């Protein structure tokens, strides 16, 4: 009864909301919880999402991404394109124009010198810049006048929206950071903890790994924003506690990354104090099938290298059968609910690059069995298939995480049904992703037949991501186990197509090539079995309006538009 | 306590004889008077029967996933309900108990053997005392977790290959736990042996030329059995709990081998909605540990001639 009244009240409030748009600082305090606490507000010194997103309350780039992944202007007057002359015909330079009369929060004007300084700051070889990849290939930056910035690239750049686009490469104030370049970067505590920015907020107090408080920026370019007078980002706890603080107790207005089991979440939501938001980007939970032999039968140094093809998984029919046995919809229902959706694509988004491949979604146990029969694997005495005296047995590893262990149990059973024996292995996530060349348990070593984890790509262009699967990028002892071609996929056709993608600039053509590459990895070769496209998943209070979460930029990039529904 | 009445004839060698049939009966008589120990014994035997014979009667596979039966409550088909993947909780409790209890018992046996041996040698032979005690201190100072990490990384694969994933992990875990938890027992035993050495019956035995081996097995060991029993009962509890922690860190059994500790950790997320999933394994761990502790308590009382009869 009481619940019903609350819900009705909330519904009534949301109807009245649009009338409540107010001027700056009238809506009191905005409380945000990030269960991983921010440790710095300088995104150039930390690759952590928690840090770049917290910093996006204060620092802004020239352009950002909207919810569909399109580039939208922030400090720039408009987005450069070939049509408006911002992008050169030879794709080797891009020219940005700043909005006129922009001011830093201390009142001084924003000029092209600040933008150039930021690039120099990050590209300084002694600085250890965490976002260096965004400035890769930049040859030089020219500032013909106070509002114009021209970036020259060494090579033609089909996608020039890396530097100064998105919350990972915002503009720093030259006057503040001038003394902090190179090796001094990390010693400038005062600057890194309280950067002067152009965004809607000014840092009031920063306590490392605990809490950040903000006040509205008096010099923000839109005089009506932000609606809140003060804001706070509190860190600490875990995903479940963060979700509870918004959905069940209502202590916070917004919680980042509230990834908890669907049934637990449903119970929290029944309190009626908040709602969840999901935005689907490029994060895909997948099974990588090792094309090489990772077992300890091979001598150390030759395990999981191109010298020994996998005795079982080299057969495409076996790989396809393994995929057919899996019910991806059921996996999603148990593990992710609203925060995920079943997928057959390695590149599930943005739309222009996502293949229409849905063939794997329907489970087909009988088909899988038939395919294994055809491949010569016959059912042995104990229900496990055999061929030439070898049992159809796979080692299946994954980092430790309750959802992944549930997935392992489910998939093991499905594979059992088609006569495949599975040995499960779990590895501490910090070891698995740690990249230590000396540890045999990293995902690059891949001393197993199958491994499950999630990965995504930065930004909206999948080219670098798809280029990871070329033959030359296999991790091996010679490369100190570095390299992103985790499953040791190698197809000269694929390499050729990747090279072609690097030379193609026009949009529909780029999308088509990316889709073909995606299909080669997934539905054609079945060397990667995508399972679930995982979304960003956050929670907001029912009284918080203006939230428009996308998957392509910081969740806090538009806090200027947030307001209290009264 | 050991004062002898002048009128009683002094036995020539006042040593405790090896427990004969009569003595065993006497210990059992004493043990029965300890109510807590009797309750503990009954509970422990029940748990042993449940995990030992239970799976022969209740034949559902503990790892069988049944999607249509997820998150069920208590029912005739699933007396203790099912978990988030529809696996039968009763079957998982029994399978988990088998592993947890065997790990507890075997690891305890290893720790006890090592600890008693080192304690006895160190207490009895003065020359061995200093080096053995330094070794004990060395082990006490070793950080357990990094050591286990190293052992698992180095030996999991070769052991898993020759003994199967479960057998290899079992051996690895019991050895790891046993080899890192014998130190307390060694210290306690050494202390008691040092005290015993000054007693008259030891001197008497030495004076008639009893060999060292016989001294240890016949005179010293039976007299320190009660602290060893107590250490043993505590050891089982610690071993069960250490195994749980290891499974949680991914260093323990593979995820398809349920143990009580793993069941407990797996259920934490759903604690609010399905409290039974946490309560059941927690209860079994507590019951097993408590009952073993009480049995130890009762045994000590029954076997210690100084407390006996009071």
Image (cartoon, grey):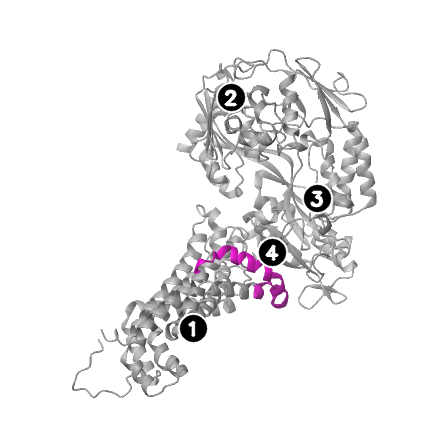
Residue at numbered disc 3: A484
Q: Nearer the viewer, mark 1 or mark 3?
A: 1
Residue at numbered disc 1: B117
Question: At 61% from the left edge and 51% from the top edge, which residue is drawn?
Answer: A398
Q: Chain of mark 3?
A: A
Question: Real-space Cα distance between discs 1 and 4?
Answer: 37 Å
Residue A367 percent location from the top left of the image: 74, 53
Q: Nearer the viewer, mark 1 or mark 4?
A: 1
Question: Real-space Cα distance between discs 1 and 2?
Answer: 69 Å
The residue closer to the viewer here, B102 or A542, is B102
Q: Residue A180 occupies which quadrant of the picture?
A: top right
Question: Real-space Cα distance between discs 4 and 2?
Answer: 47 Å
Q: Which mark is residue A425?
A: 4
Q: Nearer the viewer, mark 1 or mark 2?
A: 1
The number of discs equals 4
Left/right of residue A124 with respect to residue A55 in the rendered view: right
Q: Chain of mark 2?
A: A
Q: Which residues are magenta?
A: B140-168
Question: Real-space Cα distance between discs 1 and 3?
Answer: 53 Å
């Amino acid at each position: 009864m009481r619940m019903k009244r609350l819900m009705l009240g909330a519904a009534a409030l949301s109807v009245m909301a649009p009338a409540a748009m107010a001027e700056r600082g009238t809506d009191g305090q905005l409380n945000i919880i990030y269960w991983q606490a921010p440790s710095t507000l300088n995104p150039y010194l930390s690759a952590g999402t928690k840090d770049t997103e917290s910093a996006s309350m204060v620092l802004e780039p020239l352009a950002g991404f909207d919810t569909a992944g399109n580039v939208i202007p922030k400090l720039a007057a408009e987005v450069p394109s070939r049509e408006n002359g911002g992008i050169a015909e030879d794709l080797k330079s891009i020219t940005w124009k700043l909005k006129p009369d922009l001011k830093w929060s201390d009142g001084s004007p924003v000029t092209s010198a600040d933008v150039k300084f930021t690039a120099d700051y990050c590209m300084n070889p002694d600085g250890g810049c965490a976002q260096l990849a965004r400035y890769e290939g930049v040859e030089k930056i020219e500032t013909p006048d106070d509002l114009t910035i021209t970036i020259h690239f060494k090579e033609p750049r089909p996608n020039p929206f890396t530097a100064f686009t998105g919350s990972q490469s915002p503009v720093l104030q030259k006057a503040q950071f001038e003394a902090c370049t190179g090796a001094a970067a990390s010693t400038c505590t005062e600057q890194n903890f309280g950067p002067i920015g152009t965004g809607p907020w000014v840092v009031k107090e920063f306590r490392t790994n605990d809490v950040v408080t903000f006040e509205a920026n008096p010099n923000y370019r839109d005089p009506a924003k932000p609606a809140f007078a003060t804001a706070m980002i509190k860190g600490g706890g875990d995903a479940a506690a963060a979700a509870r603080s918004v959905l069940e107790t209502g202590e916070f207005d917004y919680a980042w990354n509230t990834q908890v089991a669907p049934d637990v979440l449903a119970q929290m939501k029944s309190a009626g104090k908040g709602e969840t938001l999901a935005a689907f980007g490029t994060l895909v939970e997948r099974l990588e099938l090792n094309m090489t032999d990772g077992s300890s039968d091979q001598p150390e140094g030759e395990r999981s290298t191109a010298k020994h093809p996998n005795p079982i998984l080299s057969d495409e029919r076996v790989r396809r059968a393994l995929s057919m046995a899996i019910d991806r919809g059921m996996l999603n229902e148990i593990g992710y609910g609203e925060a995920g959706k079943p997928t057959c694509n390695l590149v599930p988004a943005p739309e222009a690059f996502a293949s229409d491949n849905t063939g794997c979604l329907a489970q087909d146990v009988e088909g899988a069995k038939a395919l294994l029969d055809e491949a010569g694997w016959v059912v042995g005495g104990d229900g496990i298939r055999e061929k030439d005296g070898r049992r159809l047995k796979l080692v299946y590893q994954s980092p430790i995480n309750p959802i992944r262990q549930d997935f392992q149990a489910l998939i093991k059973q499905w594979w059992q049904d088609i006569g495949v024996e599975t040995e499960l292995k779990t590895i501490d996530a910090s070891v698995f992703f740690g990249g230590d060349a000396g540890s045999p348990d990293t995902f690059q070593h891949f001393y197993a037949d199958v491994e499950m984890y999630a990965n995504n790509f930065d930004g909206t262009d999948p080219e670098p991501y798809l280029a990871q699967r070329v033959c030359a990028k296999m991790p091996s002892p010679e490369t100190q186990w570095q390299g992103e071609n985790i499953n040791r996929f190698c197809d000269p056709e694929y390499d050729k197509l990747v090279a072609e993608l690097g030379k193609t600039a026009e949009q529909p053509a780029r999308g088509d090539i990316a889709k073909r590459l995606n299909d080669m990895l997934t539905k054609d070769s079945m060397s990667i079995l995508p399972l679930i496209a995982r979304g960003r998943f956050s929670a907001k209070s029912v009284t918080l309006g203006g939230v428009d979460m996308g998957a392509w930029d910081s969740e806090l990039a538009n806090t200027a538009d947030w307001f209290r529904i009264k | 306590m050991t004062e002898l009445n002048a009128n009683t004839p002094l036995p020539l060698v006042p040593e405790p004889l090896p427990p004969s049939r009569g003595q065993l009966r006497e210990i059992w008589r004493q043990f029965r008077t300890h109510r807590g120990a009797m309750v503990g014994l009954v509970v422990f035997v029940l748990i042993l029967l449940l995990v030992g014979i239970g799976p022969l009667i209740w034949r559902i596979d503990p790892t069988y996933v049944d999607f249509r039966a997820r998150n069920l409550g208590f029912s005739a088909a699933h007396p203790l309900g099912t978990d988030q993947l529809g696996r039968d909780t009763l079957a998982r409790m029994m399978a988990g108990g088998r592993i947890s209890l065997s790990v507890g018992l075997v690891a305890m046996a290893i720790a006890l053997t090592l600890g008693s041996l080192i304690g006895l040698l160190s207490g009895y032979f003065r020359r061995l005392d200093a080096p053995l005690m330094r070794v004990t201190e060395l082990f006490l100072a070793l950080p357990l977790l990094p050591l286990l990490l190293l052992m698992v990384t180095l030996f999991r694969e070769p052991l898993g290959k020759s003994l199967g994933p479960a057998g290899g992990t079992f051996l690895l875990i019991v050895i790891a736990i046993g080899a890192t938890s014998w130190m307390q027992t060694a210290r306690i035993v050494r202390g008691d042996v040092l005290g015993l050495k000054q007693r008259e019956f030891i001197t008497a035995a030495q004076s008639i030329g009893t060999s060292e081996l016989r001294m240890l097995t016949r005179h010293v060991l039976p007299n320190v059995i009660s602290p060893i029993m107590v250490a043993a009962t505590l050891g089982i509890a610690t071993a069960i709990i250490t195994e749980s922690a290891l499974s949680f860190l991914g260093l323990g059994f593979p995820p398809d081998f349920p143990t009580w500790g793993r069941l407990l950790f797996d259920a934490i997320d759903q604690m609010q909605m399905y409290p039974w999933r946490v309560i059941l394994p927690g209860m079994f761990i507590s019951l097993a540990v408590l009952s073993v502790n009480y049995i130890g308590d009762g045994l000590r009382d029954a076997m210690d001639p100084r407390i006996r009869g009071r």
